[in-house]
Image (spheres, rainbow, N blue to C red):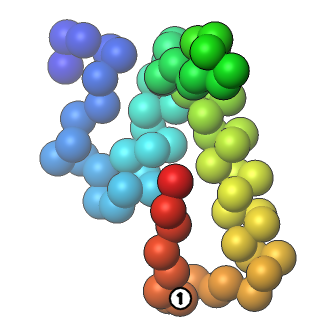
Amino acid sequence: MADHSLVELARAPTVAHLWRARIEASPSALAFEHRRGGVWSPVTWRQADARVRRIAAGLLALGIEKGSRIAILS
């Protein structure tokens, strides 16, 4: 694959694997920008992963288990 900033979808067996591969490919690259109070702030893949892990830890603390069905509204 010539562009190392992209992750090859065909090789990722799950969304979680795809997520990890993307972070490992370029953790310091811009993932998205977040707007708060009219100001846009950059978020790297590493920072996005930290946010996802905090959310996952919170769900586990609430008793959500593997295989549980949930809905997340944002």
The picture places residue 57, in percent across and down from the top left corner, at 77, 64
Q: In the picture shown, does residue 7 fall above or below 63?
A: above
Q: In the picture shown, does residue 31 fall above or below 16?
A: above
Of the 4 image quadrants, the one containing the N terminus is top left
The residue sitting at the right extreme is 61
Q: Residue at x 70, y 52 (%)?
A: 53
The picture places residue 36, in percent across and down from the top left corner, at 66, 24
Q: In the picture shown, does residue 42 fall above or below 15?
A: above
Q: Residue at x 37, y 46 (%)?
A: 18
Secondary structure at badge 1 equals: loop
Q: Is residue 32 left or right of residue 41?
A: left
In terms of image quadrants, where is residue 60? bottom right
Q: Residue at x 50, y 62 (%)?
A: 73
Q: Is residue 3 left or right of residue 62?
A: left
Within 10 Å of disc 1 (Cα), the crowding (few <14, some 14-19, many 20+) is few
For the residue marked with disc 1, what is the amino acid? Ser
Q: Is residue 11 left or right of residue 21?
A: left
Residue 17 visible in the displayed image: yes
The picture places residue 15, in percent across and down from the top left corner, at 37, 56
Count the marks: how many? Answer: 1
Residue 24 visible in the displayed image: no
In terms of image quadrants, where is residue 21? top left
Q: In the picture shown, does residue 43 fall above or below 7?
A: above
Q: Which residue is mark 1?
A: 68
Q: Nearer the viewer, residue 40 or 53?
A: 40
Q: Residue at x 57, y 24 (%)?
A: 34
The picture places residue 25, in percent across and down from the top left corner, at 46, 23
